[in-house]
Image (cartoon, coloured by chain):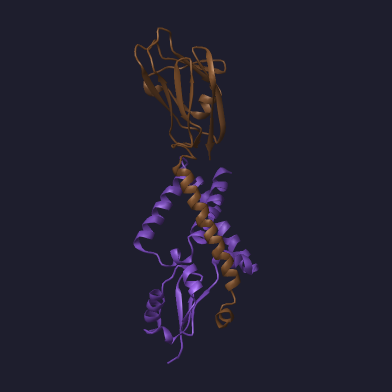
Amino acid sequence: MAKELADPYRPLQRRFWMVERVGWVVLTLIILWAAAGGAGGGPLSQTRLQGAGVELGYDEFTRRGARTPIELRWPAASDRELTVSLDGAFVDRMKLDFYLHGLSPVRSGQTVTLSLGRPTEPGRLVFNAHPVEFGTSSSEIRIGGQPIGRISVFVFP
Amino acid sequence: MEGVLKAALLYFVLMILLRTIAGRRTMGEMTAFDLLLLLIVGDITQEFLVGDDASLTGVVIVISTFVVIDVALSLLQQRFTLVSHWVEGVPTVLCCNGELDEEALRKARIREDEILAAARQSQGIDRREDIKLAMLEANGKISIVPRRQS
């Protein structure tokens, strides 16, 4: 009782302490979410698309400006020309870097097509994206002209 | 526009993280490591704030935003006590007439020996019983009122 009288701010202080502890919980959840890849680079964000003899691995979530690898894997040799087509808007928004591998994408209308030649053995290529705008960016993926699905990436600010 | 929004957002995020969530003790008792952490925080936030824009105009916009928010907040604190309490915090009684307030110690993350250290340093008191009042001030420091004034 004497302490309560000596500390007129105690009820308010208790509310501050409660806010502080709620903050600790929120920060811990943010750390766990980030460690699990909620903002990219972990199991929560990694996803795969398969079709037409190739596999595409990418992060569904990433952060603006963060290097975001997109992996293209072909498990077998092919006697056909391997081409990958994406929407031009997606390539621009995600700032996809094809030039790292010396590849020259061809832009035709709203589509960007990348030709990887005839693979003589299984292989993989990793492209880096550096998304410039936050929000969802998506594109239909076509391998050899055949759609295999949609790639959709949410970019955190 | 983007610079102003970023600076304003960062001001409030840092205020919530460092003042509201980290607590007064973190800010009041800064160790060399805490200082190092703050330098790292400064370095990280600098990248977010100015990015590629290293122009004088960009820097002036960001600093002006910080100063204006700071002044506006101080005016609000002067006018509304509740705002002042939320932003600055309130003093907390840790020890009254030699009796420790266990709840306050636990919640404020303070040990008895920290109170005794503050008592020794500020009042030359080395016994808890000689403390009339030990308070955690809004700035994170522990102030001591001795039981017998000499």
Residue nearest the viewer, comparing A97 with B1? A97
Q: Position of residue B125 (x, y in %)?
A: 38, 85
Position of residue B143 in the picture relative to residue A5 (left or right): left
Q: Is residue B102 visible?
A: yes
Question: Residue drawn 56% across and 48% down?
Answer: B4
Q: Is residue B55 visible?
A: no
Q: Position of residue B111 (x, y in %)?
A: 41, 72
Residue nearest the viewer, comparing A126 with B79? A126
Q: Position of residue B129 (x, y in %)?
A: 43, 86
Q: Quadrant of residue B79?
A: bottom right
Question: Residue drawn 63% across and 64% down?
Answer: B76
Please count the marks in the image: 0
Question: Which residue is situated farthest in the top direction here?
Answer: A79
Question: Which residue is situated farthest in the right direction here?
Answer: B79
- Which chain is tinted brown? A
Task: Name the colour assigned to chain B in the rendering.
Answer: purple
Residue nearest the viewer, comparing B18 with A73? A73
Q: Position of residue A85 (x, y in %)?
A: 50, 17
Question: Residue drawn 45% across and 15% down?
Answer: A53
Q: Quarter holding the N terminus of chain A?
A: bottom right
A37 over A143 or under it: above or below = below
A116 over B60 or under it: above or below = above
